[in-house]
Image (tube, rainbow, N blue to C red):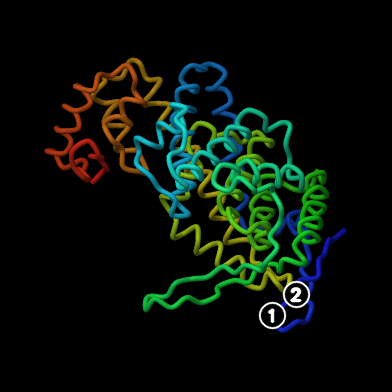
Amino acid sequence: MVFYVQITAENGFKTMHIFDYSFLKDDLLPAQLVTYAANISTLKVMTSMRRNENAAAFRQLESIARIESVKASNAIEGIVTTDNRIRALVGGGSAPLNHTEAEIAGYRDALNEIHVNFAAHDFRESDIRNLHAQMMRLAEPGANGAYKTEDNVIAERMLDGRRIVRFQPTCAADTPEAMRQLVLAYVEARDDVAINKLLLIPCVILDFLCVHPFKDGNGRLSRLLTLLLLYRNGFDAGRYMSFEAVINAHKAEYYEALKESSVGWGESHPRYFPFMVNFLSTLYECYNELDRRFGAVAAAKVSKKKRIESTVLNSFTPLSKSDICAILPDVSPTTVEAVLGAMVRGGLIRRLGGGRGTKYLRA
C-alpha cells in the first residue's frame, strides 16, 4: 500500500507526493547501506553487553552526552551560549536567563523525555506535537504543538548575501494531511518484517523535514525524533555519545546529503540514498566514538596520562579542561593541565582560545 497527499505547488496546481517505503524491501539496495547496517548491528550488540557489565561507566557517559547533545543540536541552528551556561542549564538545574537559553532549556526537557520515556512514545502525530510543544514551551509559552498556519521555505544564503529558495516544503493548508499520511506510511513499514528498521528511520526523518510541519524548530525536532526511533529499535548509542554532536562536527556533509535527497521530493521522486548514507555513517561514527570513550572511562589499568591523551585525541570536538575532568572524574585538574601542556608542546594538540575558555583539539 502507498500513501499520498496532494501538495500545492507555487503555480497553484496540485502535485502528488507519495509516501512509500516498500523500496526498502528491494534486495538491490546499495551495498554500502547494507554493510553499514550490518556493522552497526554488530556494534549495537557489543554496546549492550558492555552496558550490562559496566553500568557506572555508562551512567557517566550518559551525563556527558546529554550536555553535548543539547549544545550541539541547538548550535546547528545557530542557538548558542557559553559552555558554563550549557552545563548549568542541563546538569545544574539553572533557569534560563534569556530567549536563547529558553530554547536550549526546552530542548533539554524534550531530550530528557525521550531518554526517560521513549518506550511510551512513537512516531505518532500526538507524540510529535507534544514533543514540539515541550521543546518550545519556554521560548514560546503559547506554543501548543500546532502545525504551521503560514507557508514556510527553506532558504540558502549566497556568497553575495542574496537568499534563494532551496526547497519549498508542504504548504500550510496541506500539512495536516501530509503528516497523517506520513505517519500511516511509517506504521505500515514499521510493521513489515521485510523492512530493515534501521534503514527506515532516515527515510521517515527526511520526509518529516520535507513536510516541515511547524513554524519553527523542525530541525531540532527531527533530531529528537531520530533518537526516539533509534531508541525504540534498540540503537541507543546516542544516549551515551551525542548523535547530534557528530552531526554538528560534519554539518556541511549533513546539509549536502539533505539537499541531494530532497531533490524531486514534491514530485514523489526523492533520492533517499544520500541522506540514508549520511545517517548511517553518523551513527557508525557515534558507536565508534562511544567505544573510544568507554575505553577512556573504563580502562582502570591504563595510566592517567594515556587516558587523558586518548580522550583528547579521539574527540570530534574541542575539549576544555573541565570537559576532560568530567569524562575522567578520578583524574585531578592539575594532572589534566600538565598532560595538556605536554601535548601542546609536543605538537599532538593545539590550544584554542585563552583563559577559562581554553579548549584543545588534536593537531
Residue 17, position in %: x, y?
76, 68
For marks 1 and 2, give the CA distance: 7 Å
Residue at mark 2: 8
Left or right of 130, for residue 352: left
**Res. 10 mark:** 1
Q: How many marks?
A: 2
The foreground one among 132 and 37 is 132
Residue extending farthest to the bottom is 11
Left or right of 316, for residue 118: right
- The answer to whether 136 is drawn above or below residue 164 in the figure is above
Local secondary structure at mark 1:
loop
Q: Where on the picture, by quarter, is residue 98?
A: top left
Q: Residues within 10 Å of mark 1 (few under 14, many from 20)?
A: few
Q: Residues within 10 Å of mark 2 (few under 14, many from 20)?
A: some
As shown in the figure, which amino acid type bears the numbered disc 1? Glu
> Residue shown at 50%/64% (left/top)?
256
> Residue shown at 65%/39% (left/top)?
228
Local secondary structure at mark 2:
strand
